[in-house]
Image (cartoon, helix red, strand yellow):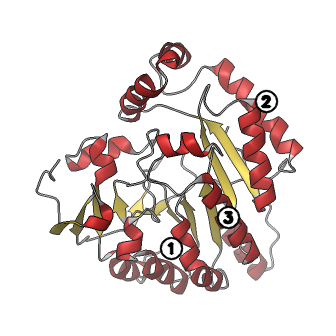
Amino acid sequence: MDALLPLAGLVRSVSTPEFSGVTFHEVTAKSVLNKVPTGSNMPFEWTVNPYRGCSHACVYCFARKSHTYLEFDAGRDFDSQVVVKINAAEVLRKELAKPSWGHHQVALGTNTDPYQRAEGRYALMPGIIRALADSGTPFSILTKGTLLARDIPLLKHAATQVPVDLGISLAMTNEDLAALIEPGTPSPRARLKLIARLRDAGLGCGVMAMPILPWLTDSDEALDSLFAGLAQAGATGVSAGALYLKPGTREWYMDWLAAQHPGLVGKYRRLYGNGWYASKEYRTWLTGRITHFKAKYGFTGSSGFSHRNARHSSAATDAQTAGVAVPLPGQQPLF
């Protein structure tokens, strides 16, 4: 569909042959540093999202409903109507230079992916990384995008200035299923290679193995393949957990399920009822299987990825500088 205007700060809307089916809405933002509401259970306080909407088109994406705040729908529009904050780096640098900025950790990839295909066109992330590192602000990035490899030299340098926490989102190794359910993402094989490249570059790389999809990616065969691949690639830890179905995501996912796996629709309805989460019994069972495969492949005790590590590294650095020994909070797997 066409954009439902007005979008605040809209400069122009662009469609190009190399991004067939996607419209970019270029906007100038007044602010890009977002404070997480007080009382949130998120493991971070500040975020930056240079893009709204995501051409990865993951059917299960939890952020779909956020697109409705822009008068787009949570389905096809989320995949194809991408808002680009073209001045994100410049605005961020100014915000971080304010005397009131407390150098808190900033999380990227919390809503939509900063290394989705649009980043190949707009190249916003290098300026964002430099602004964060130059200001002494620790940061974390979670992505499915192999375009992150472009910025490995920049990230290595940033890691000498501030704590940097990197995570790759990968929850399946079945290439055919991935092509259906996350059609705009780099393949699982490509993401495993990215993990290996990050590790070869001396950078840590946790993995967010979420969501595990009931009856699609939760078999012992699927989980063994996933954890074996992550271990071989050199992942520093794995956080894993089941699909949850928020409003906006639930409708889109269930429509996809009805088209691709109609025999599972009734099972999902019984498993999820009217809620967001799978039944407690299922989650307990899945936790047991995840614990088994983490142990099998040497991930027991690893923190995985949760946007917490950069914050804790920063706390440790500050404590060491002050000559004070401060124990860090334990890392809880996101089961």
Residue type, mark 2 in image: Gly
Residue 305 pos. (x, y %):
66, 55
Q: Is the C-beta separation of discs 2 and 1 under 8 Å? A: no
User: Marks 1 and 3: which is nearer the front?
Assistant: 3
Element type at marker 2? helix
Depth check, mark 2 against mark 1: the one in front is 2
Residue type pointed to by label 3:
Lys
> Which structural element holds mark 1?
loop
Q: How far apart are the alpha carbons under marks 2 and 1?
A: 40 Å
Specify the label residue 102 is tagged with.
1
Tell me where residue 252 appears, x and y as whole percent: 37, 33
What amino acid is found at the position of numbered circle 1 in the picture? Gly
Residue 212, x across and y down, in percent:
62, 36
Q: Is residue 334 visible?
A: no
Sequence-earlier tag: 2 or 1: 1
Q: Please tell me which of labels 1 and 3 falls first in the chain.
A: 1
The quadrant in which residue 24 appears is bottom left
| Disc 1 to disc 3: CB gap under 8 Å | no
Q: Residues within 10 Å of mark 1 (few under 14, many from 20)?
A: few
Q: Relative to 118, is 29 on the left or the right?
A: left
Write down the residue under mark 2. 288
Q: Residues within 10 Å of mark 3 (few under 14, many from 20)?
A: some
Residue 235, image x, y percentages: 75, 59
Residue drawn where x is 60% and y is 30% of the image: 216
Q: Which residue is mark 3?
A: 193
Image quadrant in which the C terminus is located: top right
Q: Which residue is found at the position 16% from the left and 59% from the top?
A: 7
As drawn, is 226 to the left or to the right of 55? right
Q: Residues within 10 Å of mark 2 (few under 14, many from 20)?
A: few
